[in-house]
Image: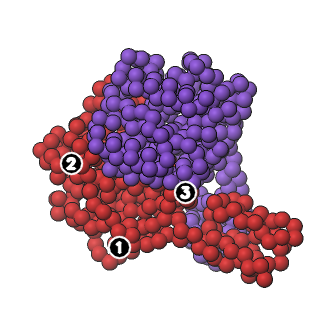
Chain colours: A purple, B red
Amino acid sequence: MKELVVVSGKGGVGKTSIAASLAVLLSRKLKVTAADTDVDAPNLAIVLGADVRRELDVRSSEKAVVDVSKCTGCGKCVEVCKFSSITLAEGKAVVDRLACEGCGACSIVCPTNAISIVQVKTGEVGVADTEYGFKLVSGHLEIGEANSGHVVTAVKWLARRKAEEEGADLLIVDGPPGIGCPVIASLAAASHALVVSEPTPAGAWNLTRIIQVINHFKIPFMLVVNKWNLSPQYTTALEAIAKQGGGELAARIPVDYTIAEAMAMRKPVVAYKPEAESSKAIAKLADIILERLS
Amino acid sequence: MPRVAVTGGKGGTGKTTVAANTAYTLAQMGLRVLLIDADVDAPSSSRFLGVSTARVLDVMSFLPAVDPEKCTMCGLCAQACRPHALVHVEGKLPMLFPELCSGCEACKLVCPSNAITDSQKLLGWVNKAEAHGITLVEGELQPTEARSTLVLLKAMEYARSLKSERSYDMTIVDTAPGTHCNVIHAIRGADLALAVTEPTPLGVHDLELILKLTQKLQVRTAVVLNRADLPGGTPEEVERIASRHHTPIVAEIPLDPLVQSSHIQGKPVLELAPSSRAAEAFRTLAKAVLELASAGAFLA
């Protein structure tokens, strides 16, 4: 089974719209399973008009808990905490649960064993049946939790299992923005990456950064420039950056507000209006991807 | 001095556009503005303002190095290491997986023979620029590094050190997308949060997530509706969510091609087209921010 991960460096450049349309188009030629690993803001289900049923909880986060009856307020825990998550208030250690990484350094130095480390819920993973005939696996991080990488890994684990059950040829993963932990977890063991970018100075800078991450993991990648006609000059610049990074130029998608209309109807643009300019460009992109996967 | 966090849940709703243009507008009004780019994965404010930043700090993190002379192979370090970056193998030195290390130093704290020293790894940088009457501080994560929080905390700490040297009238923090811990570090303690959203189902969905977060953090919040007149948009849905959370919509920024040109040219909207509709919207927003943030700081 192949695994195509859609990433971008910068957020809001069209990853989810493009991933949803690609999943619909490719599912007509291949057996497809889709996954959404943007666990901070999982939106693929919305664009596909699908409802996710919870299947499992992810409980990988750990937090420090202070037993106030044992705490002497010595402040050693405050000193060792690298994440600024413990303070002293009224002579007792207070853990900021939203900032605590659960590393346990505080519990090691506490002279009165007043601090223990407990497991808490990190997020949830669920599955949806889409009206397009393929399954979607989606997860979300509990608001304010830290270990998004763990939820991403759980989404990918369940998605691969569902894909195997379905006998899928392709898993399409709609990744998170950025280049940090959840992106790295999304790219793990992928066979191909699709990078979405837009033609602005910020787009170019963030493209350079995501390519460094992709190349570090030695994953072959393709570039798609969204809203390319906003700046043909920057589009050319993006394509030069991708080429220099060893990537393939796959497609240019024009500015097209049909995508927003389709989104309001909770449909991928290729299903809402196949004759729209953006749909035609995405259809070409799907053909190129199909060729590369085989 | 008030601090405003510009956030929004979803990526690409216009956080940086709002943060950079609000900073620029306030600076034009004569305020001394400190702008912190806290999206260390994809720091873009400098590109929006057309300024180049200089590196002022390397962000280093603790990474254990085991002294083979001192190590007794007792395995306590691996036991203490919750991310499993150190693995104990009977009769051998502990194995290190650097990409899993959080830099917490628990291993060093438990080692009975002082065999663990710090070999330091580079996580990223803190950068700075002075331009348009704005001091810009940005955190930049080194590509292939996962631990962005420490880069963000360092950038925030550096910004605080600047504030002790010089007085600013307003601090604006441009947060990362999402609702994770980096976003929390950037919002916590702010006098005002601006939730930037767009009139699409995705914008609405993620707006609700961020409003729940700012409520949890007890930070007063106002909504900025970007691309307000997006064809096919659903602004009434944004209004419904905002009012359900008792949050005002303080500005509507039109879908103006000039905003897109400002991104491409790397110039603030007020510099590029001071009499455009978008520029007018940013002026309205800047005034609202000043009022709400000052009131927030006063109440706090």
- The extreme left residue here reads B275
Chain under callout 3: B
Q: CA distance from mark 2 to mark 3?
A: 33 Å
**Residue depicted at x 60% and y 60%:** A100
Residue A109 position (above or below residue A23): below
**Residue depicted at x 77% and y 79%:** B68
**Residue depicted at x 64% and y 23%:** A31
* Quadrant the C terminus of chain A occupies: top right
State the mark number for residue B144. Answer: 3
Label 3, residues with CA under 10 Å away: few <14, some 14-19, many ≥20:
many
Residue B63 position (above or below residue A14): below
State the mark number for residue B33. Answer: none
Q: Secondary structure at mark 2?
A: helix
Judged left or right of residue B280, residue B36 is right
Q: What residue would you read off at disc 2?
A: B269
**Residue depicted at x 33% and y 27%:** A256
State the mark number for residue B162. Answer: 1
Name which quarter of the figure residue B63 lies in.
bottom right
Among the two numbered marks 2 and 1 on one chain, the one whose residue lies closer to the N terminus: 1
